[in-house]
Amino acid sequence: MKNKIKRISAVVAMAMTLTMFSSLSVLAEDAAAASNTPIVLAASSETTGEQGGTGSSQETIPQAVSDATITSYFVTMIDGADEFWGWGERANVTIELTTAVESAVSARFINNAAFNADSNIVQGEVSSQGNRHAITFKNVKYNGGGNTLEFELTVAGHGVFNLSQTIAQCYDVNPNPPTPEPTAVPEPTAKPEYDYPKIIVKDFSFGGTSVEAGKEFTLDLVLFTTSGDANLEDVMVGLNFGEAKNVSLASGSMNTYVGAMAPNTTKTISYKMMTDATIEPGAININVNLSSKNGETIASPISIPVVQPERFDITNMEAPETIMMGEEGYLSVTFVNKGKSAINNLSAEIQGENLANPGQSQFLGNIAAGTENSVDFSVVAQAEGTITGKVILSYEDAKGETKTLEKDFSCTVEPGMSMDDMMGMPGDMMDDAMAQDVQPGMPIWGWILIVVGVCAVVTIVIVVVRKKRKAAKLAQLEDEDEDI
């Protein structure tokens, strides 16, 4: 590539030399007319081509500025293998220019990043003829990083001007590029002497699907080692309860020494544990830490569901001992939830034999923890004899399982009273009174009213007694709850 550029530069230089000779006569005429015609001079110029070789020149297109115009330049190489000006090479640079008037000039080289001159010869050598001047800067070194040469021109009587010239012969390629640092090759990872197995918690159990709050349970951990070609030594198992504050060991230590375990083997270890009776239903999270002398340390989390014990019960049932045919009796069942969890979707149903109205059912909803309620049913006999039946409470516990509570009852059914039975006694008494010549007594309808009144009083008394019994039972249950 560099040889190709050299050939092109040589051809261009020859063409420009011929052009320069053909324009000498024109330049002479311009010089003769300079005393009569004012000239606007240039402080910088742009090159129209490049020219190589020792003593070669570069034609430029003048650009009008204030007092000076660069017309051409020459580069004479001091060192270097060819006409290109490479990094670190030195050359003499001659710049030809014209000024607006015939006046003495001087020039000083300006060092920059691309070019610098010897500090002893920064002043250029000036050769003048009228208003044409040739300035030579000697021993200029090219450093790369650009190709603009700068100098300061002083024109007597007209001031100081900064001029610049682009040098086309510059070959801006570092001949000694820095050697890139070799990429560090990571050292090969040393292959372990043995392939030790890993240890994991393969399975665990705690005696069911959940544990009951306040009760002791056994946690069984099944450890398993994966494949390998060496034993794990000094295997240790530790429990970490983390933020779980309501669980503890019932006995023993939280850290268990297992010892050596061969690859592809299992081992079961057990812990006696218990939870506080006041723990909220939910789950306790435990981290099982597994470590060994020559293997990896692994933390395996496990979760154990916790439920509160169910304390839902029927505390009282009030049922009539005897009813008459055609009479409607009432049965009341009281229940209480003494547990820490709610009872959900409670419903009550009455079933039995000799009932005229079987299959009565009521939906009671959810029963919150620590609350009591009751349900009432009517009892009507189908025939004389005995009614035997039961009240069934169906509900869902905290785990969503459906459960039932049952309470049996029985009731004697007696024949109902006829009108003759109700009227018999008062009529006999009236006949006896009449036989003894006693004044006629109360009429029959009066006795009927008396019997009805007596029945009403008896009914009221029964209701009052039932209410008093129920109130006493409720007071007893509240005392029991306070004891709990």
Image (cartoon, rainbow, N blue to C red):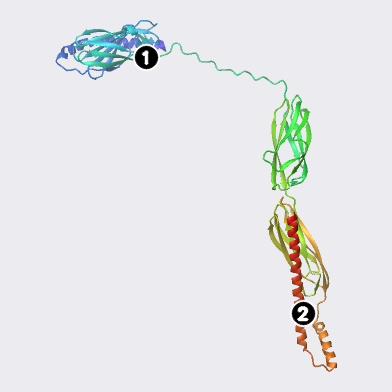
Name the image quarter holding the N terminus.
top left
Q: Which amino acid lies under the numbered mark 2 shown in the image of this protein?
A: Val
Whether 57 is drawn above or below 205: the answer is above
- Viewer can see residue 332: no
Callout 2 environment at 10 Å: few (<14), some (14 to 19), or many (20+)? Answer: few
Q: Quadrant of residue 260?
A: top right
Name the one closer to the observer, 217 or 113: 217
Whether 149 is drawn above or below 361: the answer is above
Name the one closer to the observer, 340 or 292: 340
Place of residue 276 in the rendered image (x, y in percent of width and height, measured from the top left): 73, 45
Place of residue 13 in the rendered image (x, y in percent of width and height, measured from the top left): 31, 10
Whether 126 is drawn above or below 37: the answer is above
Residue at image coords 76%, 59%: 314
* Furthest residue in direction bottom, as rendered: 437
As measured in the structure, the alpha-carbon distance from the residue carrying label 2 to the one carrying label 1 is: 134 Å
Residue at image coords 48%, 13%: 178
Q: Quadrant of residue 208?
A: top right
Name the image quarter holding the C terminus.
bottom right
Mark 2 residue element? helix
Q: Which amino acid lies under the numbered mark 1 shown in the image of this protein?
A: Ala
- Viewer can see residue 284: yes
Q: Badge 1 is on which residue?
A: 114
Q: Badge 2 is on which residue?
A: 454
Name the one closer to the observer, 297 or 229: 297
Name the one closer to the observer, 128 or 446: 446
